[in-house]
Structure formats: structure tokens, C-alpha cells
Amino acid sequence: MRLCLSLVILALPLSAAAADPDAPERGSVRFEPAGDQKDIPERYRLAAHAFDYEMTLKYRLPASGLTVSRVRFPSPVESPHKENNTVHAEFYRPDGKGPFPGLIILDITGGDQSLSRSMGTYFAQKGIAGLFVQMAYYGPRRRPGSRLRLLSTNLPHSMNALRQTVLDLRRATAWLEARPEVDRKRLGIVGTSLGSMVGALAAEMEPKLRRVAVLLGGGGLVDAYYDHPQAAPYRIPFEKLGGTKAMVVKLLAPVDPLTCAANLKDRKVLIIAGKRDEIVLPKMSVALWEASGRQKIVWYDCTHYGAIAYVMPGLTQVANHFTAP
């Protein structure tokens, strides 16, 4: 009898550990492209495949009604930099069974992750499951002390990093789609500044992202900046060597959200823009709005950085956009 009792007692910690809700979750997700991908340029296509992931608890916020977990999975692109080849993300899950709308969140150019983490928390409190995904060469995807960034004067590097990020986001969409607590028919993406342009580009290449929010972003990169006074030190010597604006348009077309913006006409698109934005010029937001079907655009009387004064009304617009029927 004592022996049996001892065996039961010894077995209890093992059973408890096996049922530990905070234990790391590991699994495999199947990526299946929607349709024949004929409207997606070759550089952004992905064939059907499976990939592994790991999710670990970061912290719980019971008072706020959400749980935050770290998510990792391999990038479908192998860059020359080891750290960059693992995609890092954070999953902001509302409490409850769901199913919740699922939303990918992208950061700003100089992002320290604080804005995206605040957005993830806010959206989860509104009943939206958010996956904040680190773009290529952001955060832990860059070796400490490294000068590598997603965007740089090394154009081939930037083009490759943008392609990698878009393909990473296609995998991230598959991960969200596979979550039992997420409504696979209500997936979307939101980004701010650079993140909004990358988000628009990713949505154009991933038909499963049915709702798109572009915050302080747009399209028409060359038309916006080629004749800008600050571009003169680069434009003038470029033209003296035989370069033309048409050459730059063709070169940047694969990463300009305007190129495939027609793919967004059957989605629900929200654009939030600053009337006095000096970084993403208002005409860039208008260009993307027109090319994506003239859907909803909201203007605030602000500069690019002055948009901080409109964070709460802007986030309310976005939350309503993703929770609307």
C-alpha cells in the first residue's frame, strides 16, 4: 500500500508538468497558397510547404484580459546572416475562446518595438488577436552592434530584405490561420510608416489578408522623392552618368506598393494620413488610395511625427476597421 502511495506521489509532478499551460508549445504549420498566385510576382510566391514553430509564454496581463507569448519560426529565405533567418514575433491573445479576428502588426522605421507592443495590447483588449512580427534585420534578427538594417544605401540588400519580410509575413499569416482561437476568415495586417508600406506590399501578395490598415504610408516612391531637393545630391551625379527617372521607377517597382495595388481592390482597406506629412507625402497616400479602389481614407491635420497626437483616435479607427462585419 505504501509503495503504491509513493508511486502516486512521485507521479504527480510529472502529470502536472505535462498539463502545464505555460509549457512551450511546439508544432508544425502547413502553408497553402490561395489560388494559382497568377497575380503575384514570382519573387513573392511560395509553394505549399510545412514549417515548424515554437511559442513560449512571455507574460500574462489578467487585469487587461490578455496573454503575450513569444513566437519563433524559420524564415523561408536564407540570408547571409544567421540571426536574420529566424522570424521573431509576439502573439497578443485576448482572454476567452474566440474565435477572434487575427491581425499582423508591423513597426516603424526606427522601431524600438514600443509602439507595436502598445498596439498589440490595445487590439487584444478590443478582442483582436495581434501578432507583432519583427521585419528582416529588426530587433533580435540583427546581431548586437551590427549596422545592418532593412533599408540601407546598399540597394540589393534592401530589395532582398523587403522580399524576405514579405515572404516571412506570408508564413506568419499561415501561422495565424492555423490558430484555433483565431477566425481564419478575418485576417488582416496593420503597419505604421515603413511598416505600413511593407504591410500593404505583403497584403498584395497574400490574399488571405482580407483587411488592411495603412498608417502614415502610401505608394509611388519615385514620383514622391526623385525631384525632392534633398535627393539632388544623389540625383544629379546619377543623371550625369546616364541615369534616368524611368530607370529608377523600373528598379523599385518590385517593392513599391503602388505596383500591385490593384490586388487590394477586393479587400477592405483603411488609410490614415497626415495632411502635412513631410516624410510620407500626402500625394503618396492619395496615390495608394486611388490605386487600391478609393476605399476609406482618414486625414488628420498633422505632420509625420505630429501624428502622435492622434494615436488614440487613429487606433480606434483601426480597431473598428478590423472588428466591423
Image: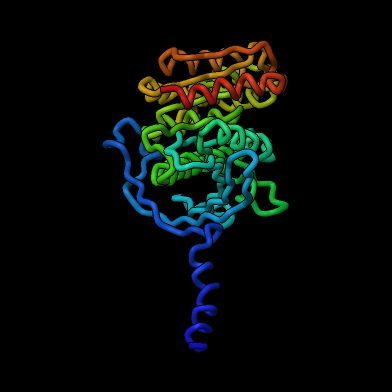
User: Above or below — where is 301 with respect to 319?
Assistant: above
Residue at 70% of width from left, 23% of height from top? 308
Give x and y (percent) for residue 232: 67, 21
Quadrant of the image for the C terminus?
top left
Q: In which quarter of the view is residue 226 placed?
A: top right
Residue sitting nearer the eye, 71 or 21: 21
Give x and y (percent) for residue 11: 50, 77
Give x and y (percent) for residue 54: 50, 57
- The answer to whether one can see residue 239 in this image is no
Instruction: Determine whether, in the image, residue 242 is placed left or right of residue 99.
Output: right
Point out the residue furthest to the front here. Answer: 1
User: Above or below — where is 324 with respect to 178?
Assistant: above
Residue at 44% of width from left, 27% of height from top? 211
Residue at 65% of width from left, 40% of height from top? 63
Q: In which quarter of the view is residue 81 placed?
A: bottom right
Give x and y (percent) for residue 191: 56, 30
Point out the residue furthest to the left here. Answer: 36
Structure colour scheme: rainbow
- The answer to whether one can see residue 269 in this image is yes
Residue at 43% of width from left, 40% of height from top? 182
Instruction: Determine whether, in the image, residue 217 is placed left or right of residue 49.
Output: right
Total marks shown come to 0
Q: In which quarter of the view is residue 143 placed?
A: bottom right
Instruction: Determine whether, in the image, residue 175 is placed left or right of residue 320.
Output: left
